[in-house]
Image (cartoon, rainbow, N blue to C red):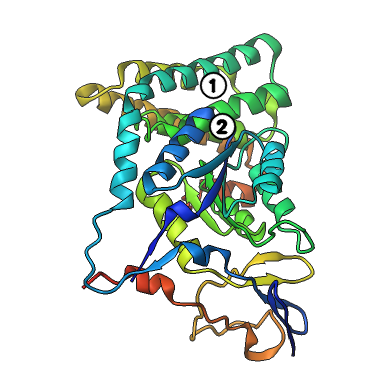
Amino acid sequence: MTEKKNSIAAVSTFADHEVIVPPNKLKKAVVNVRPGTHIDFDPVSRAEAALAELASEFSSWMEQECDRLDAARMAIRACGVDTATRDSLFRAAHDIKGQAATFGFPLVAPVAESLCRLIEHAPDMARLPIDLVDQHVDAIRAITHRNTRGDSAMNAARLAERLRQVTDEFLRRENRDRPDYLESILAPPIAPGD
Amino acid sequence: MVRIDFNRLRFLVIDDNAHMRRTVRTLLHGFGTREVYEAEDGAGGLEAFNHYSPDIVITDWAMPIFDGLELAQMIRQPTSNTNPYVAIIMLTGHSEKKRVVASRDAGITEFLAKPISAKGLYQRILNVVANPRSFIRTKSYFGPDRRRNVNPNYAGSERRKGGKADVIRQQPLLEKAKTPVG
């Protein structure tokens, strides 16, 4: 092992790799606090409060996202499925999947997720079932408009579950010759969130 | 114990969705950050990265032109004149295992699945600030050490050659951060 240091980074060189300790530029933001010091600032609470002030805009934002999804669906209806129309539909659905819960529409997210799976994992885009796409888009619109609660929330959850079942049945059928791929897409997600 | 002075950090948020950029910006300002720059696709993100030299990059994955993964690979060029060691947080609606692994192998520092929350974002930022990792360069990889922990019970083959130096000791700031005051 050889070791050299310079003002940029400390580098340790090994047979097949280097270990580099870069200068810690983020150290400037670390503040040591003495034990017992009272801190009258909770950054997480402050950020949550700041986000709450935006909440009045969330319904409008979701409407815009639904319009975008609808436009992407209509483009597929008008022009057929190609890389551009498929990607446009996927990105619209994917954004709703990621944002719906933050914007106060948690029941929409599973339907958007199911639509994302349908688009992403259908091996042949010419065989993308447009009727099933329509059902997803219509469900997302309906649940968003009503922002359902109570009994309606149960119906929304059932609808999401059924759409997911139909989607997974389609994906199983279409990917039956790719068992490894099928296994990977049916595996539970592992991504760290909260 | 440590706390983060967000006012001393400069962020770059890259997302093609204006609503999500506004959401992330709002959270960062809530933490106390003043300097938040934005870009709406990978190409604009790379340009902004070179121009503003942010301390932390928060990027979406699915974007037009080139995506967040490709952006990370472009930033992680060991000979780059800009900061190839910058902390990159992947904020994405993707949550499958293969995506997490691909992010890690592209040199992403932290992965945060949407829906975003103040707590989740804060924890990722705390981690990159208070618990910096060494970088590893091999023929096929340049990025943060993918071994976050040393497992004393590991019994498999050793893929890195060169003796004990592959055990990377970290500055235990994060542990200090988790210690309650008083």
The answer, for residue B122, to whether it is visible in the render is yes
Quadrant the C terminus of chain B occupies: bottom left
**Disc on the earlier residue, 1 or 2:** 2
Is A179 situated above or below A37?
above
Kindly identify the residue that appears in the image at 51 percent across and 80 percent down. B150
Dot 2: what SS? helix
Chain identity of mark 2:
A
Quadrant, the N terminus of chain B:
bottom left
User: The residue under label 2 is which amino acid type?
Assistant: Leu
The image quadrant of residue B80 is bottom right
Q: Nearer the viewer, residue B146 or A110?
A: B146
Mark 1 and mark 2 in contact? Answer it, CB < 8 Å. yes
Q: Which residue is mark 1?
A: A133
At label 1, counting other C-alpha atoms closer than 10 Å, the crowd grade (few under 14, some 14-19, many 20 or more) is many
Toward the viewer: A69 or A158? A69
Give the residue drawn at x 59%, y 32%.
B16
* SS for dot 1: helix
Residue at which label 2 appears: A118
The reply to whether residue A193 is visible in this rendering is no
Answer with the quarter of the image where residue A39 lies: bottom left
Q: Position of residue B11 (x, y in %)?
A: 54, 48
Q: Residues within 10 Å of mark 2 (few under 14, many from 20)?
A: many
Where residue A65 sits in the image (x, y, percent)?
Answer: 49, 21
Amino acid bearing label 1:
Val
Chain ID, mark 1: A
Distance CA(mark 1)–CA(mark 2): 8 Å
Height in image: A47 above or below B85?
Answer: above
Camera-side residue: B58 or B116? B58
Q: Is residue B149 left or right of residue B71?
A: left
Going 52% across and 46% down the picture, which residue do you hit? B91
